[in-house]
């Protein structure tokens, strides 16, 4: 389907325009540009002469190979294949087309050109890979077709077994094979309703299994409530990774918009797009490359780990082992909420509304400041290790705490609060933030002024010696965390009490 101004969707999709002459009616399919669904027009031209089957419109190898799948599927499904020259055009012509999802729309376009698909008032968007026998195979692109169908006020035809977010389930119909797809368009069959199966519980360790570490538990709750970036520093075995794994269980469910965006990101990477109710949690290894973290690849750029963690958590374990250039690539996405990947002929903007949680050892040996074991790192080695983390990157972590090794006596203590209990407090705090300008990590200085007891803040600045080293940006970061603490307590205005705790959670403020 050709793009109309502002990306609007024409209303003459499958079956809505009768067959006319040699240049026949078109079928609508879909494609992703970055993580944005775009309609694609699939049209077929038949002419006499030597039998040829040509596909134009920047198809990749998978699309070109669809010629044999479509030819066999049509014949095995009882449809005739044209004997002359067949030209299938995929437009817009300058948009690269990839994957086997174009099998079904190409086959339907040929059926329209030869036998017709009727003149039904409903518009359809088709997507799916065909087997040689005409059966449809499940692909990762059903969510893309459903999004295009929603924007076009149409119905998406997708393979049976596909799942989409709940918000899109009413815009898609599942079909098992080519014959059933044709019958649905002609109005002689209804197709199958799509299931919107979602994860029933978040993945991760429940908070009740964390023994001791009361300060770290409190820091995690604050970080979850305000979406603040968090850094934990401590010796090996202190429980930093375990604590980070509990964070997904503290976050509220995704709403319909967020769930759809997360599914589109996964589709852009070719992953299964089963509906998700809880935020994603990504934990790349420290050997990751720049392209794998930010996004890229040959041809049309694909999203990296930053975007795969959209609306969720990006956990960086062993932060000091990551290449400095890779870490510095995080600085802009952590602030802006998006990342732009440019390649020759393409510049794609990927969303990256992420919460970064990192864990690091204090030094190469890991035991600097540990009460049980002494540090063996010499000065130069320690300096090189600490230099891997730039000041601008560290400054973006609103919550920075030291995690000490748990005492053996704490391991025999009673279980703490469950993640479900903490998540309810976090959800209440986030509901308050929803009435303002998003999560507290994004509040501006003006926003904070309106939510603060100015006299109390002035008194705090005058009496707290540590604030003398703060920059204006560092002060605003402390105020944001303090606002989150106030939201958790149900306080209307931020006071000196919350500012003191926020300063303590800031740790090293240099």
Image: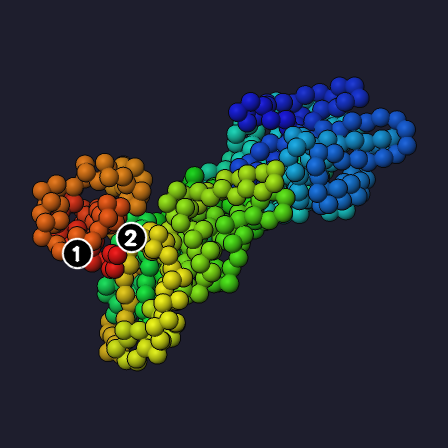
Q: Residue furthest bottom?
A: 373
> Between 30 and 33, which is closer to the camera in this rendering?
33
Q: Earlier in the sequence, mark 1 or mark 2?
A: 2
Asked whether, in this view, residue 110 is left or right of residue 456, the answer is: right
The crowd level at tag 2 (other Cα within 10 Å; few <14, some 14-19, many 20+) is: many
Q: Position of residue 17 (x, y in %)?
A: 68, 21
How crowded pointer 1 is (Cα within 10 Å; few <14, some 14-19, many 20+) is rated as few
Cα–Cα gap, marks 1 and 2: 16 Å
Q: Quadrant of the N terminus?
A: top right
Determine whether 367 is above or below 266 in the image: below
Could you tell whether 203 is left or right of 396 in the image?
A: right
Q: Residue at x 26, y 67 (%)?
A: 213
Q: Which residue is mark 2?
A: 398
Nearest the camera: 383 or 333? 383
Q: Quadrant of residue 369?
A: bottom left
**Image coords of residue 283 (percent x, y):** 45, 59
Scheme by which the image is coloured: rainbow
> Residue 98 location, x and y as percent?
66, 42
Residue 495, can we see it? yes
* Residue 117 drawn above or below residue 78: above
Helix, strand or loop under label 2: loop
Residue positioned 26% across, 54% down in the render: 222
* Quadrant assignment for the C terminus: bottom left
Question: Which residue is labeled 1 in the image?
Answer: 466
Residue 412 - label: none
Q: Is residue 97 above or below residue 360?
A: above
Secondary-structure class at tag 1: helix
Q: Which one is in front in this view, the residue at disc 1 or the one at disc 2?
A: 1
């Amino acid at each position: 389907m050709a793009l109309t101004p502002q990306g609007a969707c024409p209303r003459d999709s499958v079956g809505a325009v009768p067959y006319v002459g040699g240049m026949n009616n078109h079928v609508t399919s879909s494609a992703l540009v970055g993580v944005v669904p775009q309609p694609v027009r699939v049209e077929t031209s038949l002419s006499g002469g030597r039998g040829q089957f040509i596909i134009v419109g920047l198809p990749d190898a998978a699309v070109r190979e669809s010629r044999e799948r479509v030819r066999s599927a049509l014949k095995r499904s009882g449809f005739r294949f044209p004997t002359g020259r067949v030209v299938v055009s995929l437009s817009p012509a300058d948009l690269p087309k990839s994957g086997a999802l174009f099998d079904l729309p190409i086959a339907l376009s040929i059926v329209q050109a030869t036998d017709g698909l009727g003149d039904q008032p409903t518009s359809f968007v088709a997507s799916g890979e065909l087997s040689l026998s005409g059966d449809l195979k499940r692909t990762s692109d059903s969510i893309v077709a459903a999004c295009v169908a929603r924007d076009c006020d149409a119905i998406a035809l997708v393979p049976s077994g596909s799942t989409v977010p709940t918000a899109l389930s009413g815009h898609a119909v599942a079909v098992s094979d080519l014959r059933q797809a044709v019958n649905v368009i002609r109005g002689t069959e209804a197709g199958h309703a799509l299931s919107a199966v979602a994860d029933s519980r978040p993945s991760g360790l429940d908070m009740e299994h964390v023994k001791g570490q009361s300060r770290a538990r409190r820091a995690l709750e604050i970080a979850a409530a305000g979406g603040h970036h968090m850094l934990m520093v401590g010796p090996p075995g202190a429980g930093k990774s375990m604590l980070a794994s509990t964070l997904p269980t503290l976050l509220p469910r995704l709403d319909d918009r967020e769930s759809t965006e997360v599914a589109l990101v996964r589709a852009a990477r070719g992953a299964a797009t089963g509906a998700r109710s809880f935020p994603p949690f990504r934990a790349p290894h420290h050997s990751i490359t720049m392209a794998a973290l930010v996004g890229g690849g040959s041809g049309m750029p694909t999203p990296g780990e930053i975007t795969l963690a959209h609306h969720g958590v990006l956990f960086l374990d062993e932060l000091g082992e990551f290449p400095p250039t890779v870490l510095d690539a995080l600085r802009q996405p952590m602030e802006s909420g998006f990342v732009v990947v440019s390649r020759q002929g393409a510049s794609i903007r990927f969303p990256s509304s992420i919460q970064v949680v990192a864990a690091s050892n204090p030094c190469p040996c890991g035991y600097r400041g540990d009460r049980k074991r002494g540090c063996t790192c010499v000065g130069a080695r320690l300096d090189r290790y600490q230099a891997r983390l730039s000041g601008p990157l560290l400054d973006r972590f609103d919550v920075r705490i030291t995690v000490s090794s748990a005492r053996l006596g704490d391991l025999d203590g009673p279980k703490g609060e469950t993640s479900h209990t903490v998540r309810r407090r976090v959800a209440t705090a986030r509901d308050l933030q929803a009435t303002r300008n998003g999560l507290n990590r994004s509040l501006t200085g003006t926003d904070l002024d309106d939510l603060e007891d100015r006299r109390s803040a002035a008194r705090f600045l005058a009496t707290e010696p540590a604030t003398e080293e703060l920059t204006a940006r560092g002060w605003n970061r402390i105020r944001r965390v303090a606002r989150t603490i106030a939201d958790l307590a149900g306080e209307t205005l931020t006071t000196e009490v919350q500012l003191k705790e926020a300063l303590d959670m800031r740790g090293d403020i240099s």
